Image: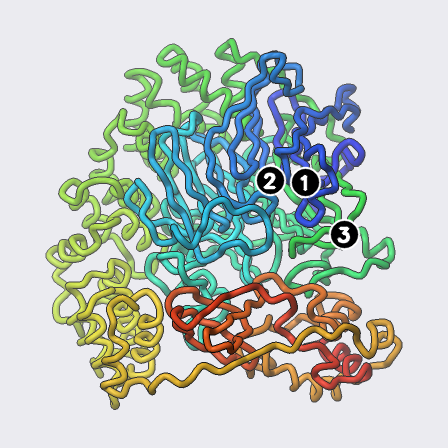
Amino acid sequence: MPEGLEITPWAASPALFNPTNLDIDHLGRVWVAEGVAYRGKSGRRPEGDRIVILEDTDGDGKCDSSKVFWQDPELVSPLGIAVFDNVVIVSQPPNLIKLTDANRDGKFDPASGDKREVMLTGFNGKNHDHSLHSVTAGPDGKWYFNQGNTCGLFTDKSGKTFRIGSQYYKDGGGEWPVNTREIAGKESDDGFVHVGGFTVRMNPDASGVEIIGHGYRNSYEQTINSRGFVFQNDNDDPPACRTSHILEFGNAGYFSPDGKRFWNADRRPGQDVPTAHWRQDDPGTMPAGDVYGGGSPTGIAFYENGALGDKFTGTLLSCEAARNVIFGYQPKQDGAGFKLDRTDFLTTNPEKNFDGADFTGGTKKKDAPDQDKLKFNFRPSDVCVGPDGALYVTDWTDPRVGGHDTQDEAASGIVYRIAPKGFKSVVPKIDLSKTEGAILALKSPAVNVRYLGYQKLKAAGASAYPAVEKVLEDPNPYVAARAIWLMPYLGEKGRAKLNELMKGDNAANRLTAFRAVRRTDGIIDALPYAKKLASDPAPEVRAEAAQAMRFRKFDEARDVLVAVAEGYDGKDRAYLESLGLGAAHDTESLWKAIGQKLKPGAPATWSDAFARLTWRLMPQAAVASLKTRAASKDLSDDQRKLAVDSLAFIKSKESVEALMELAAEGSPVRDQALWWLVNRGDGEWSDLGFKDELKKRKLVEEAVPLQEVIVPAKPESTKFKVEDVMALKGDASRGKTVAARCVMCHKLEGNGPDYGPDLKGFGSRQAPEVVARSIIDPSFDISHGFEGSAINLKDGKWIDGIIIADGDPVVIRSTGGITQRVPKGQIASTKHMDRSAMLGADQLGMSAQDVADVVEWMKKY
């Protein structure tokens, strides 16, 4: 932890149990959502999970009051809680629930006039981690929340329906009222296709929903700073967890654009996992940010002001339960995106010897000494800034995290407080009936308290202008920024101040002022401002001007988008993606307009910037030019490859023909073009029906008969146990030789298939007992993302493996990396395997000594 700060236990069981999420209200009370009925423990609390209120009533720095606000069988491990005065928002799939505590007694009781409303419904994943998460108020007065890749089908209060699906369906337990596969690739009423996990921005009455990010796996939470930037973390198929800036309307890339293929179905030759996992080589995806490997990221917060001191202003805090750490970042503007340099803000495990997580092989040994418990059982589930300016952290406290598992039968929980040494908590008394009280709320360190001040000042209109204008002078840039969002509603003086800010020298203020205009939902027309800002000196401001064009007709947006394109430096990925997102469905028209303006010349002489613009905009009119570039001997390998990749994202018969010609013998890009033809023929372009033509031109071999692959049944017992292995002394050199048997499923020293988890570093991240058990009994704890499926063919054959694409054909990868494309017409049924796809030690002919040797070798591999 940073010098000068101290951490103290603020509350612990029995005051709370298994905390999944927290919020802190304007009175300084800590509200916690509990998950005692988590996953396989759903019957542990038949009366339902709880929302509890914790309070320090005597000011001694520790909680001395715990009361139940709401307990109901409806609550089954809810993952989100947000409090706005006497309004409480609970994220409990399939519903986003609004509870109003009418008499403010801190106990939800409909008999006393309290009201329960379902704001939105249709979210999958009740009692599933990849589901509905917490609401956070933005500086714009909007509410933000996200949903994991269990997806959903819901209609907002404006009457718009959103159909957000994916290939991920009925995996990992939970309840799935919506068939995600049936709606995958379908357009929502906003005119766009959204897939996987997603982030919502909406009005507080659940109208005006916008999907401002999608394509996630399982983003646990989001945070919005006072400049309007949204940050999140996201889970992975190991090893590719990330902390990211959400580019407005951006796609993170976990699924294909139609949601029907997982990332690994489209992994290109030579791509590392993080690049493939978040499709960083694909147009139409946003920058992934800090991709740090395996983990289980949870709550996230942005510290702007409070008790910690000025050096922490602008700190992004991200909980990482699997790594026993809260990461700290100081996001730095980098073009239109951000540079995210990671530090360990708080950790119990500075040695980074991780255990008890999916990416370490699963369950931690239960007989660990107390010192290990202190190290490994710190599982931060959320972090929040209180109105007193301190940080509050909820700790799930469990030997295991992820994998749908929990081992702590006591369902323990802790809330820690982080503050300067000698800190005494003082919660300002906020009287929202007065302008002074609303200003005090607006300046609060607590994000959802700030919302209360915003709403009161917005309602006051022009009369609040003098008080709000003074906030603009605050030396803290984040506090000052909060005033900018109110200016559109504060009469003529407020509008004049907005114009002044957009003409000023401060790029951050120009950007925030323009965003404030955009969030008025048309009350102020953003187009005149966008036309001026499209040529702004700051790339982040120009990118915002482009994004503002997304829902406009091209005739209106053309000049703005072309001007933004002129400012592209050929390198800034966030800038380029912002341009593409702003062009929306008009990328073809934009590419032609840019060409008329820039006059790029013959295809082989294009600048790298224009080539990248073409790659992102995916125009059909560029097919012939791209084919010329791909075949040109005057260009570098990288330039030719970019041209081929560009063709592979323009779905048309002309693109198919170009790729087939480029796949001919003697072509400098033959292998790449051929790979794309096979990939597209089985995937997103299968409806173009060109597979027979590939055979006719002898570009692919005739389909071979499907090969039966059956993973042997799990033995009823094993010849030896973990303790037998632990009693032996291992030999690393022999272990390396024995481990060669694992190359049928795992990569070793760069050799082997992409089938099982990568073993690099596996043995150094957890106890030897865990490694031994994973070899002896791999079905005991299957790594998340590597659950197997069994396909029963109509001819009676079985194919066991991991399904990586469920289109037609179904693509399944089996032992040895055997990848087969199974036409759906040949499939009788598909079911989840009841065992690991990995063979155990007995089945591999390994003795206890062999396992001991492999364990010893893996300690340093």
The quadrant of the rendering that contains the C terminus is bottom right
Q: Residue at x 37, y 49 (%)?
A: 194
**As drawn, 149 above or below 498:** below
Q: Residue 176 in the image: x percent, y percent?
A: 52, 47
Q: Residue at x 55, y 67 (%)?
A: 789
**As drawn, 281 above or below 207:** below
> How far apart are the alpha carbons under marks 1 and 3?
13 Å
Q: Residue 503 in the image: x percent, y percent?
A: 28, 32
Q: Which residue position is annotated with label 3?
A: 407
Tell me, for residue 394, which label it has, or none: none
Towards the viewer: 84 or 719: 719
Q: Quadrant of residue 203?
A: top left
Q: Which residue position is annotated with label 1?
A: 35
- First in sequence: mark 1 vs mark 3: 1
Q: Is residue 723 left or right of residue 361?
A: right
**As drawn, 767 above or below 587:** below
Secondary-structure class at tag 2? loop
Crowding near the residue tagged with mark 2, few <14, some 14–19, many ≥20 C-alpha atoms within 10 Å: many
Q: Furthest residue to the front?
A: 795
Q: Which residue position is annotated with label 2?
A: 79
- First in sequence: mark 1 vs mark 2: 1
- First in sequence: mark 2 vs mark 3: 2
Q: Residue 133 in the image: x percent, y percent?
A: 54, 40
> How far apart are the alpha carbons under marks 2 and 3?
19 Å
Q: Residue at x 42, y 51 (%)?
A: 165
**Do labels 1 and 2 touch, CB within 8 Å?**
yes
Q: Residue 268 in the image: x percent, y percent?
A: 41, 73
